[in-house]
Amino acid sequence: MKRMRILAIETSCDETAVSIVHFCGEKMIRVVKNLVFSQIPIHQKYGGVVPEVAARSHVAETVSLLTQATGKQQLKSFDAIAVTQGPGLATALRVGIEAARTLTFLSGKPLIGVNHLEGHLASAWLNAQNREKFKFPLLALIVSGGHTELVLMKDFCKYKIVGQTRDDAAGECFDKSAKLMGLPYPGGPHIAQLALDGDPHAFDLPHPMLKDPSLDFSFSGLKTAVRQSWEKLEIKNKKIRKNFAASLQQTIVDVLVEKTIRAAKKFKVNGILLVGGVSANQELRRQMGERIECELKKVTFLPSDRLYITDNAAMIAAAGFWRLRNGDRTNWKTIDAKPEWNV
Ligand code: KG4
Ligand code: ZN
């Protein structure tokens, strides 16, 4: 297959990202540029993402990142443009989409609108070692701020959701609990940091849906239980805070790992992908890896590389490559944001 050079844009939430990735079949992939502007400091003072503020910041940053990434390169030196089309915040998505439409119009190159969740799936494939072991069927646990999903991957571009959250996402549970404890946004990494030397069994929190035979998740009940336990505490010293964070983290990890292992056994998959922002959690990675090694000897563990865990445009380029290779194209004249799009 001839080389394909993709220019990709991601603006679905609170990261503005632009990437240039060269694909030469499956073996040779070169991430030439991977620029990410994180809006986290901007949203921190509000305690969460404010959509209007996010969209305005994307407007300010997208052109600047595009200029930085492309330098003196001519638009015609790219073979395709990829852009996140959804899911995400409508006004934020539209900033990236409008930029991509303009580039497509000017260059005359094909455009591909990419599903952000498929981008997270492709993030695991950007790692060369993982790529070698990408043997379908695969199972993916997508855990991010807005999504907690188990996806059965029958092939590239052929997916089936086999489990999902019925209410809140795991990342949201981390973030809301952290806010309650007075930690900055986004709370996941702060909870993980506090948990490092806490006792994960100090607090007995409920494990939502663990006994339920379905592969679905639910984190809103846990969020409520966390609030009630926290408010009941009379002493909240450093040690208690550490123990509380460790117990919360362990509860979330228990549920995520157990349901993933169950799904992997049920669908007899060859490998398990762990992707999305929450997959940065060390304990989740460690315990998932251990359970797979212990109980699923023939199954390979395929977590995404640290560089591509949180939102970035290299993963959008990779998913765009899967789609373009599949013959998919998006009409630049009619493309619009799909805020609720699922894989
Ligand atoms: O995939 P992502 O960057 O954005 C979305 O598409 O949502 O995920 C962000 C989420 C946030 O909820 C954040 O708290 C969580 O990932 N996160 C973590 C860790 N690092 C990021 N959660 C737990 N432990 C971490 N180390
Ligand atoms: Zn994401």
Image (cartoon, rainbow, N blue to C red):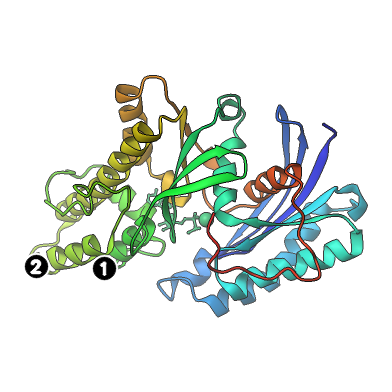
In x, y percent, where is residue 46?
Answer: 43, 76
Q: Is residue 186 left or right of residue 84?
A: left
The disc labelled 2 sits on which kind of residue?
A: Lys
Is residue 215 among the parts visible in the rendering?
A: yes
In x, y percent, where is residue 244?
Answer: 18, 54
The disc labelled 1 sits on which kind of residue?
A: Leu
Q: Quadrant of the N terminus?
A: top right
For label 2, being within 8 Å of ligand 1 is answered no
Q: Which mark is residue 232?
A: 2
In x, y percent, where is residue 298?
Answer: 41, 20
- Residue at mark 1 to residue at mark 2: CA–CA distance: 13 Å
Is residue 9 positioned above or below 41 on the image?
above
Q: Secondary structure at mark 1?
A: helix
Q: Secondary structure at mark 2?
A: helix
Q: Is residue 93 left or right of residue 163?
A: right
Residue ID at (58%, 56%)? 116
Q: Is residue 204 left or right of residue 147?
A: left
Is residue 331 positioned above or below 26 on the image?
below
73 and 146: which is toward the camera: 146
Give the residue pinned by disc 1: 180
Is residue 85 positioned above or below 297 on the image?
below
Which quadrant of the figure has residue 168? bottom left
